[in-house]
Image: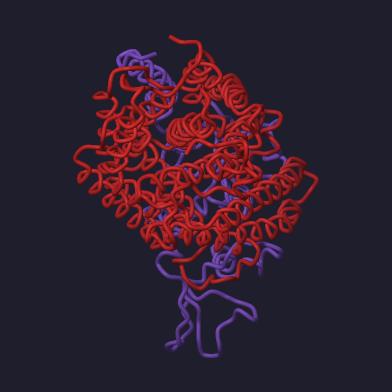
Chain colours: A red, B purple
Amino acid sequence: MSATLTMPRPAAATNPAHDKAERAEIDASTRLPVVLFYGSAIFWLLVGSLLALLASLKMNNPHFLDQWGWLTFGRVRPAHLNAVAYGWASSAAIGTGLWLMARLCRVPLRYSKLVIGAAIFWNLGVLLGTFGILAGDGRSIEWLEFPNYASGMLFVAYGLIAVWGVLMFRFRQPGHVYVSQWYLLAAFLWFPWLYSTANILLNFEPIQGGAQGAVNWWYGHNALGLWFTPIGLATAYYLIPKVLGRPIHSYYLSILGFWTLALFYSWNGMHHLIGGPFPAWMISASVVASIMMFIPVITTAINHHMTVRGNFQALKWSPTLRFTVFGAMCYTLASVQGSFMAIPSLNVITHFTHYTVGHAHLGLYAFFTMIMFGAMYYILPRVVGWEWPSARLIRWHFWLVAIGIGVMVVSLTIGGILQGLALLDPGVTFMASLDYTKPWLLIRSGSGILLTAGHIVFAVSFCLLLFKVGVKRTEPTLFGSAEDRQPEPLNP
Amino acid sequence: MNRMPVIVVGIFLTFLSSWIGLVAYPYLTLGRFTAVTDEATGDINPPTLSGLAVRGQRVYASAGCVYCHSQQVRQVGFGSDLARGWGARPTVARDYMRENPVFLGTMRTGPDLTNIGARQSSAMWHHQHLYQPTVVSPGSIMPSYRYLYTTQKIQGQRSARAIDLLPPDNPPDGYEVLPSAEAEALVAYLLSLNRNYPLPEAPEPPQ
């Protein structure tokens, strides 16, 4: 064990030409699967954004498009959640995870046709599931609304992908195992177990209602904590040192962060049911585990911060780093907020309110989605062989979504606290608790427009890159002019 | 940490611990309830749902009511659920033994529905509310569920199932608004929501 942790280096590290050829071979082997997963992810991001906007506008004006069952609020909202969770976030996670695994294990992605088949199957599953919810087949089990005909397809597709991820690790080149690889391996092993258990017990062979809530939130929280979070952290652990060209601050902090996350995150689920009809020890265990999450979160925050320290000016030039560091900072913010929300005296205010919705977007969007944008800005030029055509489009993308998500989280937080305090006081009518939220829900719709606009800009940028529009560049697309960036060369 | 077996075993064991605690344990305990007979009244609690109410439960899931309405009453000292009159006692796990899926909920854009059948026991009220929520609940942002109703020409006599509506929602002269089978089922389910019966672990508090 070395005191610092660097990317794995091949034995022939002294030979840059060999290195470069090896990287090119790996990138070429992942080209189609990565482009397919990323392309479909961006498609689902647009679909999910429109569904979200529709749901949000319906809260401002319940008469808006209320004549069809297909577009009723109670279907559009879960259709949004599932389209972004499985269509966008999971597809982005799989594309990133497979590429990172191949690069870090220094093995090309073999038999990529099977992975391409899995990508097609996955997308068909998301399509069927989303239509199923809108058609009225949704199960109303949060995070698991997809009807069985769709979730079965997702499971088969994911099983194939997970096997590929694990096999790449199994046949890695000898040498150091980097922290990102632990997270990737764990995510590929946890998610199929999680998804199959929850779907069997809730949808295929449903257990009694009294036990369903616990399984539901064990799944719901772990989908975030043991699937999206490890992929997001693996990506941040890879991209931050890579772009800055310096090693991660501390190997020991990485180990501590990983194992405490594995142990504590998996026990968080019941904090979604505080006050509910469950044995006190189950709720208490989850509250304690939620508080213990301070350990992995602060550990990871210190590790990332100390790695970037002294190089913050690089955020001005590198799109990848700007999105990734924004995401990594929001990981800390969302997790600390989550730990506090599990404290019963605060939970009694925020539970059952829009505050929770704000928290969910801080986690899945400001943390995870922003890091996935960072990964796409880094990975796509390498696999496609074409640099991003316009720094201006990237800048627009960043500011639209950064401001959009900021406004959304702040408005839902304030609206949620006002709602929660009103609900807590039996002297305040229920209708007053609703009235408090109305102006903040209107602002939330405004933030949704910003986010959707940002996603459209990103989709345009992606298409320009994919179809190799413009002149061929040899240097990566960065913000600012070359003179401004001197003397801080960034790792290409 | 360079050895695959160490990492894989660790990944497996940490996750297994929560699988045992939060999945297997509730499955073996909270998932094995039986109904109890009230010795004083002879009632079986929690009561079985009628076939129509079971179909209504599916309509409730399909329409996504759970995204705005919870079905759980928390204890005194944790929220104002009882003070708001949402139930006579806190709910316990056995109350949900017949629910599939369970609609505990995580959001209260609308009020809790654990005992809505006791609070609003008129089928007509529910139909009017579903058809146009603001008429019976001013300020509500609940959407209209009029897609569950059909407007048709009155054939001879006005149907007994037709719902009474005030302007501007009332149908033109000579027409009537009828609930679909789904609307009838949904209302039957809503009317069945009454968990104020006593259980050994949750006796109804003296009024």
B34 and B71: which is toward the camera: B71
Q: Is residue A186 left or right of residue B94?
A: left
Q: Is residue B151 or residue A50 the one in the foreground?
A: A50
Q: The N terminus of chain A lies in which quarter of the figure? A: top left
Q: Where does residue A278 sit, x and y in percent of width and height?
A: 52, 28
Of residue B162 and residue A54, the one placed in the foreground of this image is A54
Give the image quarter of residue A346: top right
Q: Nearer the viewer, residue B179 or A219?
A: A219
Residue B56 place in picture, x, y as percent: 43, 56
Which residue corresponds to the image point at 71% horizontal and 50% vertical from the top-left? A411
Report the residue that reaches farthest toward the right: A427
Residue A228 seen in the figure? yes
Count of numbered circles in the view: 0
Q: Is residue A299 left or right of residue A167?
A: right
- Residue A456, position in %: x, y? 52, 61
| x and y, in percent, of residue A245 in the image | 51, 29
Q: Is residue B38 visible?
A: no
Rendered view: A272 above or below B180: above
Looking at the picture, does residue A385 appear above or below residue B130? above
Image vertical order of residue A83 relative to residue A304, above or below: below
Residue A286 position by quadrant: top right
